[in-house]
Image (cartoon, rainbow, N blue to C red):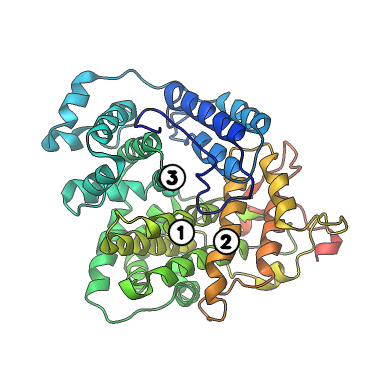
Amino acid sequence: MATSSKIVITPALTGEFSVEGLTEISAKKASEVLQKNHEDHHIFFNKSGFHNHIVHHILTIFALGASPDTIQEQYDRNASYQKPPQPVDENVIADLQDPAKFKKYLGQERHYRDYLLFFQQEIDKKGYEEVINEYMLKGDERADDMLVRMYAGFLHPIIHLGFGVEFKQPAIVAEALAEAAAHDTWIGNLLFPAEKAAKSSQTSKSLVELLDEIRADKKLSTAAHWDDGNKVRDGVLGRAGDEMLKYASQWKVSADNLEEKTAEMTNAAIYFTGGAQHPPKEVKFDFYYMHCVNCSIWYSSFLKAPWISTANKIRLLEWKGRLDLAMYASRRSPTPLLDDIKNYHPKEAGKPGSQSWDAIIKRVINHPEDGHASKLIRAIAHGEQVSKPYEGSEKFRIKDGMWLQLGNMAIDSVEGISENDSSWVRSAGFDEAWEKFKDRPRAQL
């Protein structure tokens, strides 16, 4: 049985998207390495706050059918550069019991382990569902502060939480809450005002409409500069905050359309991410946009969770859609090129069966990486499923054969990368981001 300190994965925990035939031996190996990661590693692997992705990677490739040997190999590769957790301060853990002192240690990575043990104790007493509701979704000052931190760090805390909820792992939920506690809150300068403005406005538009309008707004779409330290904070919010607020507040969700809006967010994130190409340069996915796609899958988990209120499901989804809009603007709002998706010529096009989802999945679970590519491909495959009922709507621009094309684009763009190349383009709307990349093979022009 999974507890706040013990990770137990089983083949029955298939999550939002998985292949058939998950095995007990793979589940056992995933449990083993995730337990070791839980006990031996920090949530960040360096002083710059780069995130430990082992949980993300192992659970993703488990769901995609990885063998025990592959799970161990991928774990060993990424465990090699992790750092150990810092010592626990029992005095801090005692202070965290006091709501007035709880916030004293927020935003400090050195207290990650203290918050982890605190949340484990809370989960032991109340269950992880109640702890999430109390510390993240209650709507009081403490919960709102923690919720903002969940959306910080390019969505990493809520990605981690999503895995905990999807695979019903209290220990991973505790990690996610502690991870959020170590992040900052500046993204609240968009999310709270947008929430307030949305309540007083009658205007409601689709995400793809808003993406088009953001791209046409030259002040906003050019607000981020190439040399900005953080292109959302310093560029979008720093130079065009009012404009960003105007668009963000126009995406709204209601109880009546919650399921459709979940699919809409998923489809839109894949649309602006997969379409952010720069011909004749080789196909690449933007590193920052990719996180918007990778995070999308867990809104299906949140939607299905009976212990999350409808009001909170709406709030979680609205914040995600609004942050996606800001992320899109922060990379200079490149025009999504649907023809680049439709006309893509996969590298393995001549091999029988090579372009199926099964073939793509087998390639990515064996690809030497940190989990970003496997999460991306799983999220795209999931996006196809949730978008299916709505593909006749103009709000859904990714449809039909484009899904498999995107899967091929994703694996082709990362596989076989040499040491001097990069798997990802960073800030795809800037010409400078593409300078180091080669032109496409003639067959893809």
SS at badge 2: helix
Q: Earlier in the sequence, mark 1 or mark 2?
A: 2
CB of mark 1 within 8 Å of CB of mark 2? no
Judge whether residue 306 can be spotted in this image: yes
Asked if residue 435 lies left or right of residue 299, the reply is right
Tell which of 335 and 133 is nearer to you. Answer: 133
Question: Which mark, by number, is residue 327?
Answer: 1
Q: Earlier in the sequence, mark 2 or mark 3?
A: 3
Other residues around mark 2 within 10 Å, as few (<14) / some (14–19) / many (≥20)? many
Q: In x, y percent, where is residue 40?
A: 45, 21
Residue at the image position 52 percent from the left and 57 percent from the top: 293
Secondary structure state at the residue bearing disc 3: helix
Q: CA distance from mark 1 to mark 2?
A: 10 Å
Identify the mark at residue 273; answer none if there is no mark: 2
The three-letter code of the residue at mark 3 reads His
Which amino acid type is shown beneath numbered disc 2?
Answer: Thr
Q: Amino acid at mark 1?
A: Met
**Residue 414 appears in the figure:** no
Q: Quadrant of residue 123?
A: top left
Query: Residue at the location (56% across, 59% down)?
Result: 382
